[in-house]
Image (cartoon, rainbow, N blue to C red):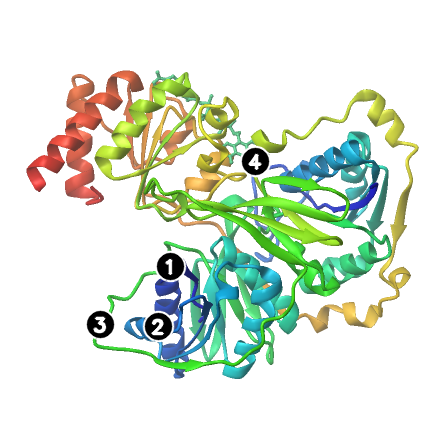
Amino acid sequence: MIAEFRGGNFRRVSFEVASEGKRIADALGIGLRGVAVGSGVAGKAAELGQYGVERVLVRDDPALEHYLAEIYVPVVAEMIKKCDPAVVILPASVDGRDLGARLGARLDITLVQDVTQVVCEGGKVKARWPIFGGKCFAWSEWADGTLPIMSCRPNVMDCLPPDTSKRAEVELADIPIPESRSRVKAVDMDSSGKVELSEADIIVSGGRGMKEASNFALVEELAKAMGAAVGASRAAVDAGWRPHSDQVGQTGKVVTPALYVAVGISGAIQHLAGMGYSRYIVAINKDPEAPIFSRADYGIVEDLFKFVPAFTEEVKRLKSTCS
Amino acid sequence: MAVNIVVILKQTPDTESVIRLAENKKSIVTRDLKWIINPYDEFAIEAALRLKEKHGGKVTVVSYGPSRVVEALRTALAMGADDAVHLDDIALKSVDFLRVTRALTAAVKELNPDIILIGSRAVDYDQGQRGAIVAEHLGWPHLALAVSLESDGKTVTIERPIEGGKVTLEAALPALVTVGGSHTIWNPRYASLPGIMKAKKKPLVVKKIADLGLDPALFKPETARIWITSLEMPPQRAPGRIIDGADAEDKARKLVTALHEEAKVI
Ligand SMILES: Cc1cc2nc3c(=O)[nH]c(=O)nc-3n(C[C@H](O)[C@H](O)[C@H](O)COP(=O)(O)OP(=O)(O)OC[C@H]3O[C@@H](n4cnc5c(N)ncnc54)[C@H](O)[C@@H]3O)c2cc1C
């Protein structure tokens, strides 16, 4: 498994990938090794042991602080060769998708991106991933003698409960860092503590039904009460009410929360492509015929301007009685 | 500082399409589908045209697939691209995407571009790896998921959203950029009527694998290293329910109870 390390820590998705790696390794009757690169990663690498990784090969260098394909790919490719793996898995995060694709080309192996399920049958690995915006799924299989490599969609694969008594054995790799024609000029991390949509457990999204930008305060307040991230439909983004980074859908983000609340969103097929993987969907819409209701677990037919404030109050009440 | 820009595009089913599985359950029924330029590739075309408008140069669009793909290439020409290359070889129908990408790489290499632009994902099989593979085959830098793009003819700079923030990347040309973002950012132009008339006269070259100096034997289906064994429809969602109540407050109470006690998500 290839772990993703950023800003001094492993990203959560790395633990999901390690957990899935452990399941695959057990099914194949082999061990699980990790590969980790980054700045300051050596001191943290043993943590992967909590999720089943036995040994981690590490390349720690300040030049690896931020992901850059031209540098990461040759380094990680060499590390994979050293491990001589039977299967390679990595996160289908923004950087992981890029790394995996180019790694596949460099090692002349075939990557399957954004896998949501893996099965091992008779020693063979099969992977499933969504196509056509989630309208169907494809299963694929690699030819004999081809190394299976796949990126796993974040928030989908179950993370093992961490076993804090276990630590992975750390091994430093001495791989030169190549010259590159590209560089990272600036990094801007949002320090507001906002939850990233593609990793959020709960999302409240607003659509054209919100009528104007200032009304998103209602959505924000509900999201705050629920500890949720805020998303939007394309209509709301096109209208300039929300930044494009909030857009959920086929040309926006694919999200996988436990709960998705769609407020004033009709449920166009391109929107469903982004939120259809949510475990529970709540739709709030005044039009009982809105297509979103056919996908929602719980539907509320009501004017959102009446309903959302009442809903927010109820959520606050619940939180205050629970805590 | 005129730059030579190549855009690789794919024709995909319209995003509204109803997808039906073919009898063999390994492919989809393509009859009756409406075809469009993959939206992300359309963003790439727009980004290329803006670069050309600012700095001069030339935009060539390259695609592969059966004869219907000509329509997508003509649309790109009508939007303002200068010429087009269509890789139309039956062998490409049955090989894996590593080989398709090899053929595309050979086709773009001949064009000697300074910048290659391509959509970050295609809305059909959604593998999002074509750009990275072409860049690796060429040994070029690639800057992925651009939501902005600037070039001074020597370098290219993009902004790339990552989880929880964004990074600014720069590369010396030649370089490949995969274009992300949304309609709001790129707002791709429509093909105007005069554009459509002009496009009919613009050069569109058709090529076969052999024309690219590639060995057709490498493109035989039996050399595939990965294949799709089956397609399946997603599991049906259990039917949902409409929560009724006397008024908004009553419905809110019932919804919160359901989310807390039944679904256990809050
Ligand atoms: C190539 C392509 C890509 C696309 N990508 C995306 C994408 O990534 N994401 C995306 O979201 N869309 C995408 N779209 C657009 C999509 O087709 C829809 O246009 C869009 O999702 C509609 O947004 P909406 O539901 O907010 O607006 P509408 O469809 O206008 O729906 C608004 C809803 O609000 C309800 N409403 C209005 N007032 C109230 C009220 N007071 N109380 C309660 N309900 C109310 C209405 O009944 C209606 O159902 C894409 C389209 C194309 C062609």
**Badges 2 and 1, same chain:** yes
| Disc on the earlier residue, 2 or 1 | 1
Amino acid type at image mark 4:
Ser
Residue A15 in the image, given as x and y percentages of width and height: 35, 64
Q: Position of residue A269 (x, y in %)?
A: 50, 34
Type of the residue with mark 1: Arg
Where is B171 relative to B52, above or below?
below
Do labels 3 and 4 touch, CB within 8 Å?
no
Q: Is residue B144 left or right of residue B193?
A: left
Dot 2: chain letter: A
Seen at 23% across and 37% down, the residue is A226
Q: Secondary structure at mark 3?
A: loop
Q: CA distance from mark 1 to mark 3?
A: 17 Å
In the displayed structure image, the side of residue B119 where residue B248 appears, left or right: left
Point out the frontmost of discs 2 and 1.
Answer: 2
The residue closer to the viewer here, B22 or B87, is B87
Give the side of residue A44 with respect to residue A310, left or right. Answer: right
Q: Please identify, in this view, whether the residue under mark 3 or under mark 4 is nearer the observer.
A: 3
Residue under the point 13% across and 37% down: A319
The Cα–Cα distance between marks 4 and 2, rounded to whole angstroms, is 39 Å
Query: Is A148 placed above or below B248 here?
Result: below
Q: Secondary structure at mark 4?
A: loop
Q: Residues within 10 Å of mark 3 (few under 14, many from 20)?
A: few
